[in-house]
Amino acid sequence: MHLIIAEKNISANRIAQILAGNEKVRAKKDGKVSTYSFDTKTVVGLKGHVVEVDFEPGYTNWRSETHTPRTLIDAGIVKKPTEKKIVSLIQKLSKKADLVTIATDYDTEGELIGKEAYELVRAVNPGVRINRARFSAITPAEIRTAFENLTDLDFDLASAGEARQTVDLMWGAALTRFISLAARRGGTNILSVGRVQSPTLAMIVEREREIESFVPQTYWMLSLATEKDGVPIEARHTAGRFTDHEAALAAEAGTKEPLVVADIKEGQKNDRAPTPFDTTTFIVAASRLGLSAANAMRLAEDLYMNGYISYPRTDNTVYPKSLNLNAILNTLKGGVFDKDVAWVQQNRRPVPTRGKKESTDHPPIHPTGSATREALGQDRWKVYELVVRRFLATLSPDAKWATTRCTFDASGEPYKATGGRLLYAGWRRVYPYSEAKENILPVLAPGERLPIKKVSLEEKETQPPARYSQSRLIQVMEEHGLGTKSTRHEVIGKLVSRRYVEGNPLRPTLVGRAVIDALDNHAETITEPEMTRTLEEHMEFIKQSRRSRDDVVTESREMLHRVFDKLEAHKSEIGTEIMEQTAEEHTVGPCPACGHDLRIRHIGVSQFIGCTGYPECRFNISLPGSTWGKAIRVEATCPEHNLSHVRLIRKGARPWDIGCPLCSHIASNVEALRMMPSMTDDLMQRLHAHHIYTVSEIAGMQPEDLANTVDVDTKEAAQLAREAEDALEVLRRRSELRKFVRKIVPPRRGRSHAKIIKNLLEQGIGDIHALSVADIAALKKAGIPETAGTELLESARGLCNERALREAGVPAVSLKKYQAGGVASPDDLCYLPIPYLASKTGINPETVHKHVDLVCRHRGRPTPQKITKPMFERGRKELLEIPGLGEATVDRLYLAGIYDAATLREANPEEISSITGIPKARLRDYIGHLK
DNA sequence: GCAAGGTC
């Protein structure tokens, strides 16, 4: 069997289809992994890297005393499978193979992925022949040639990739751990560092600093308005920007009629058709359509997977010869682009345009199938149309412009105007994304005199450089060699998720700046694109066998050790610097009570906003627990309270915007305050004015303080405090009810707990006790289904009974026994005879009496007579001596309070029978026997 | 829990 290993499933399928020719390809799924077989060949796709590098075991604890971050530099590195299913399938197929061909992408990373596959094959089949197919596009021509000219794997090329992996891992992991530990950050708050992300972040920080330190300069622009035959002309002073106001004013004053046309230069300008799309230029063009980098890539990948466009991750801007451009044009015919295609076919430029970058990985992004707007939907269509039109434009002739440069003389002051007229639209006919702005000047002749309609002197200011937009940043990253076509847009996502940057255009956060500061001061190597450049140079040496992988990695290890010499010497200093710089990140604004800063605090899973004036100022705002999301400060500010808005963020969930924490605090407590009978709007306003927002604050205040604060007398204040206590109790019970219901009734779509509780409240059920005496119909009305309702009622009753007994003073151990005996309600203890309770529970009758006494007193009922243990035991013996009276009957007699001969003798048989169910005749017999 | 690089 001939096993062919491709880089991904989709290429495996295509390669199989091409190689099979007219033969049918059998597609088979082996546990989510597809294989494509024909003849004696089987093609299988990887998923890019199916193994990953990591440190050898023993380095998982970040805080280990012995395995410090520095020790990661020299830690052994192992490869471990990340796609286990693919790995095992490859190995299963390899055992049966007599030839294996590696058909991964034609670039460094592809060679490394190929070597990973090679090692997997070798591990199970050491003797099999393994060769390599190289192609830069999955077209029939390229694939056939590649398989007719199979070569060997280039181990030097793969080694270059491995060197990169090792260097990235040790620098990234060691520095990430060091900086995170120094700044005492863990979990989701770690501070990551990496060869690509750190220089990228540094550029964003640097740009922000330039903007902050920018000093605007005032300048003046002088222009005049004239016209010919009713056509307006605007001419600018040839001095351009005047930095000297006096000079500008003088020139303005000197601008007088006559205005004479001095010179006219006519020319032609070539407007070159755009070059084929690589990933970066595609992202830039898509961003003009309003798509973020990540979105554009996601849509492009979708189109690629469905066969509409070619592979969107490419560095190539030159169509390879093997690409059949005519065939692509033909597939586009007949659809929406029919007219444009026909025009391109008739006016085709001799050779398609080509960009500066040419590579072997993939062809430039181009359409591969025809589609309709309806089939794709708005956004995908936008991207598809862009790719199609760009492709058409690269085959179209250049546009041509006629240009005019005209100079004027206004009594000695020189002016100029430029005009442009589109002579030939060329590619612009099919690619309308960049506007062709014409400015047509009327026909003028030297010496001609024109009127001056207006002279205007505008004062302007120089502008700071702009922040990076995502697409601009991706361009700059590419210029600096940072990241790859596949990862650049993800790096931005990473910086955002680490909360190093925010917004669009991108701004660094305080954390982002603090980390770059620390690294710049103590480990500048990692913040500069230089590191990538050097790494690439070294990789180039490895590719050319001029240096070995180990040699390059060893050099890098030594450099990293020198970096750690500096870092470790300043560890605590680095830590404090970062912590001090980022403290502000948690600061929300001034405390309404005392004016100190309010700060978001996280303690375990709970979080709140507290005052930095604590403990003198105890003002605080509670926040939902961190299971709802971690509270962070966001940019917006509340105009009323001057506090930053707060947001809860959680992985995989939409952020929960709390808005102004104080507004939200006030709003969420108004309802509770209204529960106090004496609360009025006026009183509430006075309370708010003194920063008292919750019932618990009122309940916690001394009546005198409260009286002084809101200006009422002490009696009223005491009443308010009591009412607050009551409201607090109601709230406490309500929240208890909520937790109770949540345990038993599972939430469902459209039946949230909030909704159930709201419904229960409307039914007058506000706590567990009310629930225990409610009927099932009321629960049904509240939207709780019958089965859950019954369970809810039962549990509620059980809980209430237990509480009542405990409250009366019945100890917990006995309570369990009563529950086991099925006699655990206060009524049971009040109304059931003591002998019955004792026999059901096995508790000493004297102890039972004590409990019954407790409950009866609690309920204001008389306590029945005491029965001692000897009385009880003797009585039982007496009863059992009566002929025909067994244990079961004794237990039933207990129910009627009969426990010995004497009580039986006095009993009324009619009455006893109805209670115990023992036939009257038999009871008479027992009594008769005693008499 | 860490990087960057593939792929989805």
Image: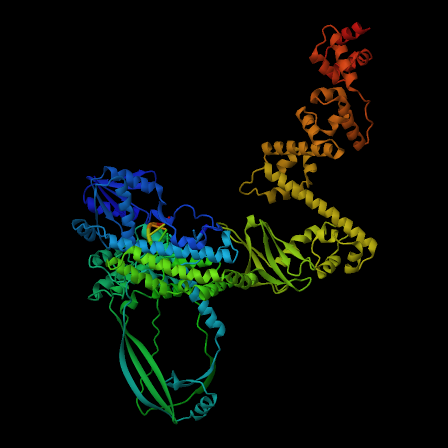
Image quadrant holding the C terminus of chain A, namely top right
Front residue of A876/A60: it is A60
| Whole-percent x, y for residue A128 in the image | 21, 41
Q: Is residue A386 above or below residue A56?
A: below
Report the number of numbered marks. Answer: 0
Residue A334 shown left or right of residue A755 in the figure = left
Q: Is residue A53 above or below residue A123?
A: below
Image quadrant holding the N terminus of chain A, namely top left
Residue A272 falls in image quadrant: bottom left
Residue A626 shown left or right of residue A927 in the figure = left
Q: Is residue A58 above or below residue A789?
A: below
Residue A734 falls in image quadrant: top right
Colour convention: rainbow
Picture residue at 61% right of the left edge, 53% below the top? A623
| Whole-percent x, y for residue A474 in the image | 38, 63
Residue A845 shown left or right of residue A328 in the figure = right
Front residue of A291/A590: it is A590
Confirm whether residue A445 shows in the render.
yes
Front residue of A729/A52: it is A52
| Whole-percent x, y for residue A702 in the image | 78, 54
Confirm whether residue A382 shows in the render.
no
Picture residue at 50% right of the left edge, 52% below the top? A188
Residue A379 falls in image quadrant: bottom left
Picture residue at 74% right of the left edge, 46% below the top? A726
Residue lying at the far left in this picture: please name it: A148
Q: Is residue A853 above or below residue A562?
A: above
| Whole-percent x, y for residue A214 in the image | 48, 75
